[in-house]
Image (spheres, rainbow, N blue to C red):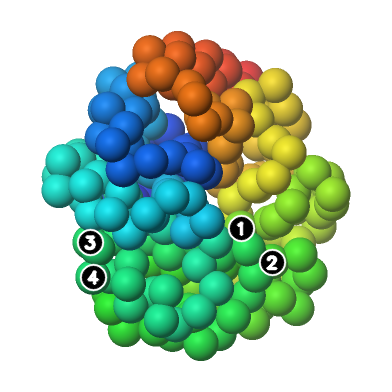
Amino acid sequence: MTDKLDNWFIEMPVVAILRGIRPDEVVEVGESLHRAGIGIIEVPLNSPDPFRSIEKLSRSLGDRCVVGAGTVLTVSDVDSVALAGGEVVVSPNTNTSVIARTLSHGMVPMPGWATVTEALSAYHSGARYLKLFPASTYGAGHIKSALAILPADCRLLAVGGVGAATADEWLRAGVHGFGIGTELYQPGFSAEQVYQSALTVVAALRAARDD
């Protein structure tokens, strides 16, 4: 699974956050994201029936995409994500127990951090993908400064208030990827709307990476 995730970060380093997605629409929306060039999909656990959505995504797109859960706060939630077929566990905070349980299931943890202390705590607990959240509160300079002392194999994501319009600034600071939510999906969006939004994000990210 780690190879699949690493490959997607090389191809298109975007985690699509489908907050509020319903199980009856999740596969069609997931297909739209994949068709546009995004292959890492997160269903936050404060969405309607999230484990069912994760299960449906895993069964339908698991061979092509990386499917995971967001807003994962407890070890019991981690167990449920694993049972549903999730591969990635994304959290807004650094909880070493959640990281350890995620790794024990063979899944990839993506804990949230704000301070270098939290980032190093997550790293030494086994996490390699570290999510600055909320990124807009701290700014791209926070990433640049943190990278000066973080281990070289950390992969830093910017999540919260970031998107296609500001991607170039964050990439120049050294960020490795992004979590993007409302720019890609909001409750009520059709699969076609998601597809068109995803095309815009993919084009902007590719242009920013080529600069």
> For the residue labelled by badge 2, is the local secondary structure a helix, a strand or a loop?
strand
Label 2 environment density (alpha carbons within 10 Å; few <14, some 14–19, many ≥20) = many
Q: Are marks 1 and 2 in contact (CB under 8 Å)?
A: yes
Q: Which residue is mark 2?
A: 113
Q: Quadrant of residue 208?
A: top right
Of helix, strand and loop, which one carries label 3? loop
Residue under circle 1?
131
- Tell me the CA gap for discs 3 and 4: 5 Å
**Mark 3 highlights which residue?**
85
The span from disc 1 to disc 2 (Cα, nearest Å) is 6 Å
Q: Position of residue 57 (x, y in %)?
A: 25, 45
Report, in whole angstroms, how far the alpha carbon at label 4 lies from the one at label 1: 24 Å
Say which of marks 1 and 3 sits in front. 3
First in sequence: mark 1 or mark 3? 3
Residue under label 4, please give it.
Answer: 83
Examine the rendered structure and indicate whether residue 7 appears above or below residue 25: below
Badge 2 or badge 4: first in the primary sequence: 4
Q: Earlier in the sequence, mark 1 or mark 2?
A: 2
Q: Amino acid at mark 2?
A: Trp
* Residue 108 location (% of width, % of height): 38, 66
Q: Amino acid at mark 1?
A: Lys
**Which residue type carries mark 4?**
Leu
> Viewed as shown, does residue 202 lie left or right of 92?
left
Q: Between disc 2 and disc 3, whose residue precedes?
A: 3
Q: Residue at x 60, y 32 (%)?
A: 182
Disc 1 versus disc 3: distance between alpha carbons?
A: 22 Å
Contact check, label 3 and label 4, Cβ < 8 Å: yes
